[in-house]
Amino acid sequence: MPPEQKAKYVGITLEKAYRLEQLINEFFEITRFNLQTVVLNKEKINLMFMLQQMADEFYPMLTPQGKQMSVNVPDGLTLWGDADKLARVFNNILKNAIVYSYENSVIDISAQQHDKNIIITFTNQGNPIPREKLETIFEKFFRLDTSRSTNTGGAGLGLAIAKEIVNAHGGNIFVQSDTEKTVFTAVLPQKQEKDKLSA
């Protein structure tokens, strides 16, 4: 086999192996959440710092299509939560926002305190999510665009995992979509349960 052809097939095999590893990790993760063995390592999270850092990390994905992220979070806004797992939630939502937003548009990330909760919204301009799909978007193996290949579309576990993590924090996550914008909203308790009890 010519070296060029060999390199091509080795590359394809490596790509498939990486893809298989990603799928296996996703299946393990959703199984772990289903068995309710999620252990939350809560700490005080500076939301402005966390969300701005995540927005910066997505810069390479945004630039080629002229997209931007705008972070609007009050300084000093904090919540108690598992930073690593919440980062997974926000990462999954932002990936979807990038994929389905129009070119040269702005993805807005905002957060505010309301009573004892922190409300975080992720807003993007793009084609609306059909009404019948809004109710199932957080279900396991749901994929908004079934025409996307498995190489780019994932297994449809990202938002299901996001919902499990938010629920484990005692919060809620939902989505609204119309012809103007799509908004994912995560509502999370600001304080730990023991803080609520003593308040």
Image: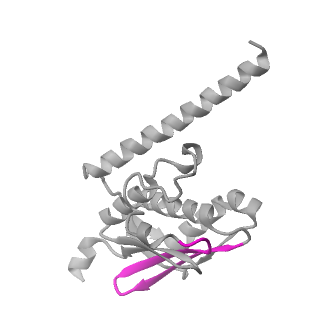
In the image, farthest residue toward the bottom: 115
User: Relative to the observer, which residue lies in front, 90 or 150?
Assistant: 150
**Residue that appears at 25% across and 78% down:** 196
Q: Is residue 165 left or right of residue 51?
A: left
Quarter residue 181 falls in: bottom right
Quarter residue 31 falls in: top left
**Residue that appears at 49% across and 36% down:** 21
Could you say where residue 186 lies in the image, as x and y percent from the top left? 42, 72
Q: Is residue 118 magenta?
A: yes
Q: Quadrant of the C terminus?
A: bottom left
**Residue that appears at 72% across and 68% down:** 103
In the image, farthest residue toward the top: 1
What predominant SS class does the magenta segment belong to? Answer: strand
Q: Quadrant of the N terminus?
A: top right
Residue interval drawn in magenta: 105-128
Quarter residue 116 falls in: bottom left
User: Relative to the observer, which residue lies in front, 139 or 42?
Assistant: 139
Q: Is residue 187 magenta?
A: no
Could you say where residue 83 lies in the image, as x and y percent from the top left? 44, 61
Name above or below for residue 146 compared with residue 116. Answer: above
Give the tally of numbered discs.
Answer: 0
Name above or below for residue 70 compared with residue 34. Answer: below
User: Relative to the observer, which residue lies in front, 33 or 97?
Assistant: 97
Name above or below for residue 103 compared with residue 84. Answer: below
Name above or below for residue 156 compared with residue 172. Answer: above
In the image, farthest residue toward the left: 197
Q: Is residue 173 left or right of residue 65?
A: left
Q: Is residue 70 left or right of residue 63?
A: left
Q: Is residue 191 left or right of residue 84?
A: left
Could you say where residue 45 lies in the image, as x and y percent from the top left? 45, 68
**Residue that appears at 40% across and 72% down:** 174
